[in-house]
Amino acid sequence: MVDVWLPYGKTDVCIRIPARNLLGTIEPKEQAGAVDQKSEIERALKEPIGTNRLNEIAKPESKVAIVIDDTTYSTPSERLLLPILAELTSAGVKNENIAIIFGYGTHRSVKPEDVTHQLDPEVSKLVKVINHDTTAPDLVYIGTTKTHGNKIHVNHVFAEADVKVLVGSVQYHYYAGYSGGRKSVLPAISGTETIRHNHTLLVNPNATAGNLENNPVHIDMTEAARLAKVDFILNVVENKKHEIIKAFAGDVETAFLEATKLVDEIYKVTVDRRADIIVVSTGGYPEDTTLYQALKGIEVSLDAVKRGGVIILVAECIEGYGNQVFYDWMSRLNEIKNVEREVKRNFAAGGQQAYYLLKTLLNHQIILVSSMPDFYASSIFKLKTARAVNDALNEAFKVTGSASRVWAMPQGNNTLPMYKAPEENKQ
């Protein structure tokens, strides 16, 4: 037996896989974090890509809006904001003219305890902290995207700022290609209808993890960021220990694209065989707090498992399913054809996860190991369930056979396996 430890919430669980069955683990390359995390952030701010330094862009009288991720991302906002505030202070910007906006997009709104978790107490005392509302009546229209005709409405504090800054982390995203960069405008601080229009594009076959070429979701997001006239970004790429490997600052497009290259270098993994069974952890907290968020780990794993294979998803889901539209679509629409039609005609934020889940279930069985009540997991979301990961593996062997080969993927949300046949690898 081979013991493989998988993140689950804030702890780890062990799955015991017979050595004869185990193909191995699919994991990112080992990459040490920067020796001095703070110095790496400061280096990036001093050496921006494609723009002037932030302390040269900002003026003493400037009103500044800084967008940060919500708690469903592992972005180390508390480490990134103080160096940014130091840059602004050196430009003479007053603290009362700085606003930090939690850009939660389609996720749940930010709770008071999230603010404590995400922000250094010193930062909260110095500047205004705002929770974006996708339905707010004072959203500002800033233009329409040319390629897809999306009317872009954004947070009014952001729209009215003199200097607009985006802060985030870059990792794989199942239909935008990557998180970070332009995604901190759309969907993060956009209105419900703007997000809806963008997300109708996700049924396009080019809207996949790790792909930006001809990806309509990405293209629409990028145009939205241009319309928003973003001045500066600070994005980071982290290792699996959530240590900052490298920071990227500067232009919203150029700096972001540089970050995606590093993500691919570390997190894109070639596999020469597809498994009968793949065991996927999303990486634990905070990526597995809800089923809605955890399912992203499945989307990126599909190239490593055979059609007809079994996916074991290890995710605590301490906050349940996580999105009411996701729940409603799964219970009401029931079939992939109905959901795809709804995505195209009457999209509601959260419905995309119903689309991806039902699409996956056409060709795979999914066994969920979580704390979620079986009623929801089985009756609503059509998943098989197991209370322990080794029970799930035994059930999977019953489906695919005792000789089945198994991949384990401990960092599912941040790993992109790409299948290449052995002969392709020799070329």
Image: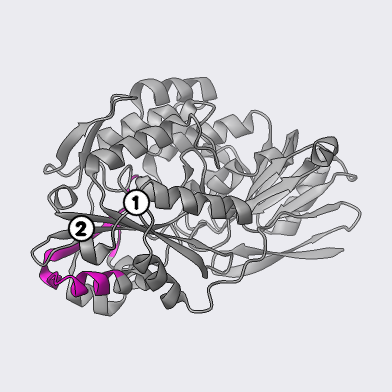
Residue ID at (58%, 60%): 283
- Residue density around tag 1, few if under 14, some if 14–19, many if 20 or more, within 10 Å: many
Q: Amino acid at mark 2?
A: Ala
- In the image, is 167 to the left or to the right of 213? left
Q: Quadrant of residue 224?
A: top left
Report if residue 23 lies within the magenta region: no
Q: Quadrant of residue 89?
A: bottom left
- 303 above or below 297? above
Q: Which type of secondary structure does the marked residue at label 1 adopt?
A: loop
**Mark 2, secondary structure of its residue:** strand
In primary-sequence order, the first of circles 2 and 1 is 2
Dots 2, 1 in contact, CB < 8 A: no
Foreground residue among 312 and 175: 175
Q: Is residue 124 left or right of residue 216?
A: left
If the image is split into quadrants, where does the C terminus sit?
A: top right
Q: Is residue 404 or residue 131 the one in the foreground? A: 131
In the image, residue 150 sits, relative to residue 298, either above or below, namely above
Region of the chain picked out in magenta, as a range: 84-111
The type of colouring in the image is: one colour
Toward which corner of the image does residue 126 lie, by quadrant?
Answer: bottom left
| In front: label 2 or label 1 | 1
Whether residue 339 is visible to the viewer of this picture, yes or no, is yes
Q: In which quadrant of the rendered image does the N terminus lie?
A: bottom right
Q: Marks 2/1: CA distance?
A: 16 Å
Q: In x, y percent, where is residue 7?
A: 62, 64
* Residue that carries the numbered disc 1 in the rendered image: 251
**Does the magenta-highlighted stretch encompass residue 92?**
yes
* Residue at image mark 2: 65
Q: Is residue 413 visible?
A: no
Residue 167 at what x, y percent from top left? 34, 59
Residue 407 vs 82, above or below: the answer is above
